[in-house]
Image (cartoon, rainbow, N blue to C red):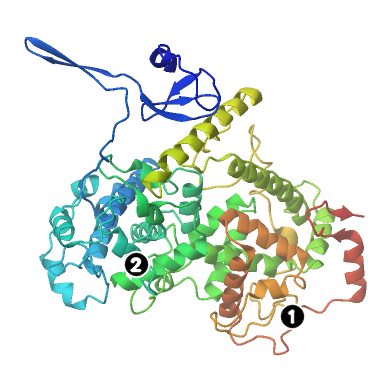
Amino acid sequence: MDDEHTAWYKEPCAQCSAVDWGVSDEGRFYCRSCHNVIERTKEVVETTYTPGSTRVSTIGRGARTKRPERGHLWMVCEAFQFILRNQANALLRLGVSPHFKDDVLCQLWRLYVQKSRQAYTNNPVRISKFKLRNLDSDSDSAARSPAISASDTDGETNLSSSVGSHAESSSDWSQGSGSVDIVSYLTTRLKRGSVLMSMKKTLALIHLALVWSHEPLTLSDLLRLVKEGHVPYVNAYEELPEEMKLDGRDGLVFKVESVPSHQVVHKEAQSLLLFLQLPAFPPINQQSLLHPALLSLRYLTDANLPDELHPWVCKLMECAGMADQKLHTIDPVSCPSLPLYDVQTVALIIITMKVLFGLDDLTEWDLSNKVADLDDSGNMFNLRRWYRLMQAALIRAQQRRDQDVARKQWKPKKPLYPSRKEKYVIMKKKRTAEQVQACFEKLSSCPVAVQPPDPSSFRFCWGDEEGADGPSLHHKRLDGVLTRKQNISTASNSTYWHPALRPCDPRKCKSHYSEMEATLPRSFVWLLQLFSFLLDVKPAYLYEEVLRMERRVLGSKTPRDGQVRRGKRSRSSRSRSRRETRMPQRGGKIKTR
């Protein structure tokens, strides 16, 4: 295509003397050898038909001064509204109920912009100051504000009057920025305790809407969909309308290069929950898919654990007092904080496995040896076989994840320019990168960009079909374990071990996992790493939740010496277990006798 426009131009390049010209996206000539950009532009013939006449106009070849293109006046909150709409539409395409967007997320967004005095208020915030404070006095105006319907989220919220008044009174609107209030927005966001919208808060607001709607999508599911590219987050500004020109300082707000962690988004959601002063959420009972009673079934299936383990998880849940729906329903009185539905459920599963199997590098292998002696038909659950199967599948899954991250294209298709002077430099680097990428694609005979995998709530696939990670163990029985462990109570279990469970202040106390990792049993550490991979969280984050859950289960019956509590076992039994099975320290194979 470039040859058609540059065939007539035979002047050599001033830098490399080559005659090999191409046309950039802006219509300017550049040298394909040294990428030198000159002032000459391609000729464009525009034919506009009118009855009885035809007008032909030609763009001049010489240098000229272009007026910067300007879009409509818009505010930062309007851009975030479009981003939230695109994220909600992506979830609707994945099967989320339309009630989530039309009746929940839309109303939460309306409440947010009203309480932050950006819209739907009789006292809008001034752009010169843009200070947010507690808006108890604006509660009456919220009742007089019109409700947002589904049509409002599909288009633009009517904020033109606010934008116009801000544009008239604003003296600090940068000519290189597309939004009206970006300067004051950035100044206020740097203050401590700011509740201004950010890209992280968009995920937090969506998470609150999913919890209110009782959608079976936990926070870890949402973040995984974002990382896989099914929900727009990184470079989400590229889907904004053409009229909303992003330039200059807008990139400091809308440009993100990584997905936030589970802990960060949960903290943002908790701050939004307090700022919005929401009423009690719909109750989450044991029939809800967010309740640990049903959510644990999903994680047991994904971890290829037997179905008979689920009743024991429910029994431990009752011992910990976690069966009450008040502990899982957000309420300003009974439960003002946002529960960690996925992390709490996994913590219950880990504690249940500690009760039944020991996980002290000794008891679990004795039980495996006993099951191997008693099981002639192969229908009993053997922890050693399960570990070998899961370890191999975990290594393969981690390798696939690392390869996908390495091949993922993080650079935007529409880069944001810090200033207009740097635009041409960035465009030149972009063309060079695209040419190098095209060369690598030809040499490797395969595309560099990775296609996002099909969305799924499960990390692994178990069964006999082709492409499965291994055979399914869901139908296995726990007879060999339950004959020895009939009581689920950890207080009366002599072999149950745990570290000191004294309450501590999370603001002053450091991570327990970094201090205890070297002394914890390796089988327990490996189980933490397995479920941390399923939730895509750090093992230390999951370990803290296990400690909190153990405090609920044990209550006041905690060791006073601060040491790891283990059951009393004979010396011969300990030495025999060490000889028969050793847990590898770095993911090796199990050595058996």
Which residue is at the front of the view, 540 or 197? 197
Three-letter amino acid code of the residue under disc 2: Thr
Q: Residue at the spot x=6%, y=9% of the render? A: 52
Q: Is residue 115 above or below residue 166?
A: below
Could you tell whether 78 is left or right of 379 in the image? left
Q: Quadrant of the C terminus?
A: bottom right
Residue that sits furthest to the left in the current view? 52
In 3D space, how far apart are the residues under numbered discs 2 and 1 (Cα atoms)? 52 Å
The numbered mark at residue 335 is none
Which residue is at the front of the view, 576 or 139? 139
Could you tell whether 128 is left or right of 480 in the image? left
Q: Residue at the spot x=44%, y=60% of the render? A: 290
Q: Which residue is mark 2?
A: 187
Q: Is residue 447 visible?
A: yes
The x and y percentages for residue 176 are: 31, 50
Secondary structure of the residue carrying tag 1 is: loop
Q: Is residue 416 visible?
A: no
